[in-house]
Amino acid sequence: MTEQAFDPRRSAGIVSALGIIATILFVVLTALVIEHGTAVSDRTMILSLRSEATPLLTSVLLAVTFVSGKLAIPALILFAAALYHRDGARVAGYYVGACVTAELLNAILKHAIYRVRPHGVSPLLTAAGGFSYPSADAMLAVAIFGLGALLLTWSIRSAALRLAAIGAAALFVIAASIARVYLGAHWPADVLGGVLAGVACSAFWLRALLRSPDFG
């Protein structure tokens, strides 16, 4: 039996709810960060994560953070090109809009909150500069890799394959977030805030795409 083509417009309500929930959680977390309410848990989690350090794990997470950071722009271009080839300028444009918005929003939030990075708490094993909250790597991993993978799965008829592809993208986002903490570049709250902000930003653009009059 042939599976029916996936209709993403049916997911508009879920996307809206996810965006609202992520936005609320981000606002709450940001308030806690500003009031230093995560300081103890952040330090505890960093030290706990570093206690599991091994040379192999360090190498793997260095590779992950290289992909999520240094290869983010090439990945954006490849995702956008693939979406343009398959769906045209509209879908590719909304995807690029989400990624650019995430980058700009991250820069604004960093300078508005100006949280310092965890110097002296764990070894800094990767390049990191500027303010800490929210994590740009985590936020852009959601927008560039997560949203890009999600949009590309729309052409997959098999529900199992779509779920596997989305799951792989989610695992990459989680790994990229853990890597930033493990490698000493961010506090745990930074990467959680980055993920929440990335989800909220991506959901906003995805909802706009799904509700655009000439979509589909």
Image: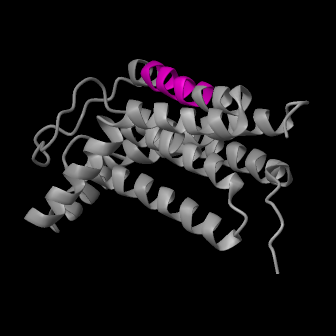
Q: Position of residue 20 (x, y in %)?
A: 71, 43
Viewer-nearest residue: 12 or 133: 12
Q: Is residue 149 above or below residue 203?
A: below
Q: Residue at x 30, y 26 (%)?
A: 131
Q: Residue furthest bottom?
A: 1
| Residue 25 seen from this side | yes
Answer whether residue 61 is magenta in the image.
no
Q: Residue at x 48, y 62 (%)?
A: 168
Which image quadrant: the C terminus? top right
Question: Is 190 situated left or right of 181 in this image?
Answer: right
Q: Position of residue 194 (x, y in %)?
A: 46, 40
Q: Position of residue 18 (x, y in %)?
A: 70, 50
Question: Is 90 situated left or right of 176 in this image?
Answer: right
| Residue 32 seen from this side | no
Dominant secondary structure of the magenta stretch? helix
Q: Position of residue 191 (x, y in %)?
A: 39, 45
Q: Which residues are magenta?
A: 97-108
Viewer-nearest residue: 169 or 45: 169
Q: Residue at x 19, y 48 (%)?
A: 183
Q: Residue at x 32, y 37 (%)?
A: 69
**Quarter-wise, where is residue 140 in the image?**
top left
Which image quadrant: the N terminus? bottom right
**Quarter-wise, where is residue 203 in the image?**
top right
